[in-house]
Amino acid sequence: MRLQVKLSGFGGQGIILSGYIVGKAAALYDGKFATHTQSYGPEARGGACAAEVIISDDKPTDYPFVTDADILVTMSQEAFETYKPLLQRNGTLIYDKDLVHIHDVPKTVKKHSIPATKIAENLGNKIVANVVMLGFFARVTGAVSKNAMVRCIRESVPSRFLDLNMRAFEEGWQWPENSRRRRRKSGAA
């Protein structure tokens, strides 16, 4: 297996940290080969940014940049518009449903949405929206194990925010299951 993952959004959303966590979790704790690269505009906050992670089960990556994304994670409309041409026709699109309005995506693309920013706000700080997204990403793709992600987040965030980040990850991880429950309840009412 070789996966090309593009994480995207705007500066200040923690996109670069997210890419670092995914790559480190895959390499150090899941025993895979992984590379991580990043790019962002000149603005510290608000400008477009992206992180790229290549994950391989069996051999080192010879080219560290995403050319055909198997998975595109996007947390801003600008990032979606910029990077959707990289998404493979049979790829997976994961997006913040309150910030990204998708269009012109092939029917063959698997689409998964989560209100990551709203969930983070409900937890008390929208700055952890990226970690909500990481939990959701790990759950729906299986690209990196939950255990590896949790271990890496514990090592990568400031200790005073550890509890908040762990709750954020768990909210993202549980979203598919909780979402199904909500649909069943509303359908039964």
Image: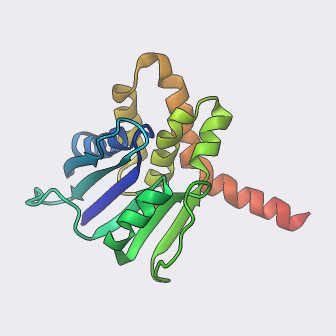
Q: How is the image coloured?
A: rainbow
Percent position of residue 103, x then y? 53, 74
Q: Residue at x 51, y 59 (%)?
A: 95
Q: Residue furthest bottom?
A: 107
Q: Is residue 47 left or right of residue 125?
A: left
The number of numbered discs placed on residues in the rendered structure image is 0
Residue 86 placement: quadrant: bottom left
Percent position of residue 175, x then y? 61, 51
Q: Residue at x 22, y 45 (%)?
A: 27
Q: Residue furthest top?
A: 160
* Quadrant of image for the N terminus: bottom left
Percent position of residue 150, x then y? 42, 36
Percent position of residue 141, x then y? 42, 60
Please say if 29 is above or below 58.
above
Q: Is residue 9 left or right of residue 40?
A: right
Q: In front here: 180 or 11?
A: 11
Please say if 160 is above or below 58.
above
Q: Residue at x 22, y 68 (%)?
A: 67
Please say if 135 is above or below 90.
above
Q: Residue at x 26, y 53 (%)?
A: 53
Tell me if I can see residue 68 in this picture.
yes
Residue 151 placement: quadrant: top left
Tell me if I can see residue 31 in this picture.
no
Q: In front here: 112 or 101?
A: 101
